[in-house]
Image (cartoon, rainbow, N blue to C red):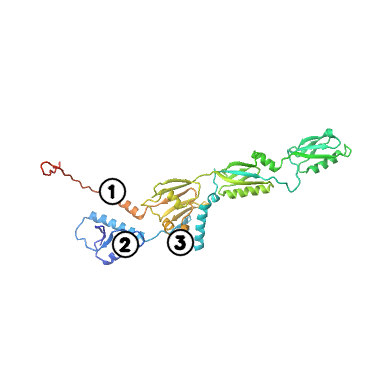
Amino acid sequence: MYLEYRGAVIFLHSGNEPGDCEKARSLLKCCRVSGRLLAGVSVTHRGLGHAGHSLRAFLFSAIAVTLLGLVASACTSARSYERTADGSTVYLDELSEAERVQARDRIAQTLIRGYDVYELQIGDEVEIFFHINRRPTSGPYLISVADKLRIEFLSETDINRTVEVRPDGRISAPLIGPVMAAGKTADELARDLERRYAKLLEKPQITINVTESHSPLEDFLLAVGSTTKTRSISVKVLPDGTIYVPVIGSVAAHGRTLRDVQRDIDAAFAAKKLDVSASVVPRTLHVGTTLIFGEVSKPGKIESDRPMTVLMTVAQAGGVLPSGSLENIRVFYVGNEGVPHVRLVNLREVIDELRLEQDMVVPRNSVVYVPPTALAKAGRLMDAVLRDILRYQGFTISGSFLMNNPGGTTTIPTPIP
């Protein structure tokens, strides 16, 4: 039995069993149905006789076996799956319709929302804008350390003075010495001083005014160091995954979105009863890196600060070469739980049948591999067999002839021995 391709005869074996022809025709028919038609290939049932050499028969047999293997592989379609290091595998075509819709929506929303779903990384720099809304406090002001107080006596004006609350919370009052002031209201401190001075003065009447306060809000404004209505600072995500915010301290940022960080900052300000709200915007983001290799036009490193799917990543690399397989693209990455994953993505179904749930948003520091097709691998195998193993370099045909010969005859040069 033979396989004929555009007039060339490929040897299979010397048998004459009709069933072999039917098997080959069935394989070729399956190949045509799957969309991988080997144009011009037909099956012929004839005898070899005694023609040919053993080497040629060996080569033709190897080519035929390879060809039939390609035909058989063309009859199967790659199934997209997600596999973890422990061997557990989830085939995406087995997902329920609700799960497929959810997967499609998740990818679409990630691409549409952009920075809203961007997860901060170590080294990212963001700018935090603080909005100050001065509003009256719900209760009376309590004197704190470093506040400046003006003590005035109604009848004894010569002992009026301005004092500062010491780090221990006390003030130095004339004639009576240290008096605890921190944690009291101005009226409470005035009544306390009147009781103390009653031993020295006749019916003392004292008034206390806070001339300079150091409330948490004032401390915050001092730390920010700006006098404008809208204040801002630039901070980086530290190696421990946090950012530092004045008055609040460390706020978790690594692996969290800008909106999540902003929500935590606002909650921390509210807990401290500060009339401050924050807006967090990206400034310099740590660029995400994806390595792509295999059968693409521009293999190498792809950097992006926005989410990208496998299809977008392959397109960024110049697209798949004719020798590449769209049906068997692999994505290697480490999940958030620290476990290695591999994802097989059939981009043929994503493109032709709009099965977006089989695509995925490429995680950071992933590796994308575009393998060669079965036909490309077979061609390279045969090239290796012929060139490297059998040292077959092909053959050439050459010749020469003379034009405009004055003698009217053609002279063929005599070969030099």
Which residue does the numbered mark 2 point to in the structure image? 28
Which residue does the numbered mark 1 point to in the structure image? 387
Which of the two discs, 1 and 3, labels the residue nearer the N terminus?
Answer: 3
Q: CA distance from mark 3 to mark 2?
A: 27 Å
Name above or below for residue 239 compared with residue 107. Answer: above
- Is residue 91 left or right of 213 when viewed as pictured? left
Name the secondary structure under disc 1.
Answer: helix
- Is residue 366 left or right of 410 when viewed as pictured? right
Residue 124 visible in the shown view = no
Q: Amino acid at mark 1?
A: Arg
Circle 2 crowding by C-alpha within 10 Å: few under 14, some 14–19, many from 20: many
Q: CB under 8 Å between callouts 1 and 3? A: no
Which of the two discs, 3 and 2, labels the residue nearer the N terminus?
Answer: 2
- Disc marking residue 238: none
* Residue closer to the observer: 292 or 154: 154
Residue 8 lies in what quarter of the image?
Answer: bottom left
Name above or below for residue 250 compared with residue 78. Answer: above
Q: Amino acid at mark 3?
A: Asp
* Residue closer to the observer: 349 or 183: 349
Name the secondary structure under disc 2.
Answer: helix
- Disc marking residue 93: 3
Q: Residue at x 50, y 60 (%)?
A: 101
Q: CA distance from mark 1 to mark 3?
A: 42 Å
Circle 1 crowding by C-alpha within 10 Å: few under 14, some 14–19, many from 20: few
Question: How many labels sit on residues?
Answer: 3
Question: Where does residue 246 sit, x and y in percent of width and height?
Answer: 64, 42
Q: Amino acid at mark 2?
A: Leu
Q: Point out the frontmost of discs 1 and 3.
A: 3
Which of the two discs, 1 and 2, labels the residue nearer the N terminus?
Answer: 2
Name the secondary structure under disc 3.
Answer: helix
Question: Where does residue 30 sit, x and y in percent of width and height?
Answer: 34, 63
Q: CA distance from mark 1 to mark 2?
A: 29 Å
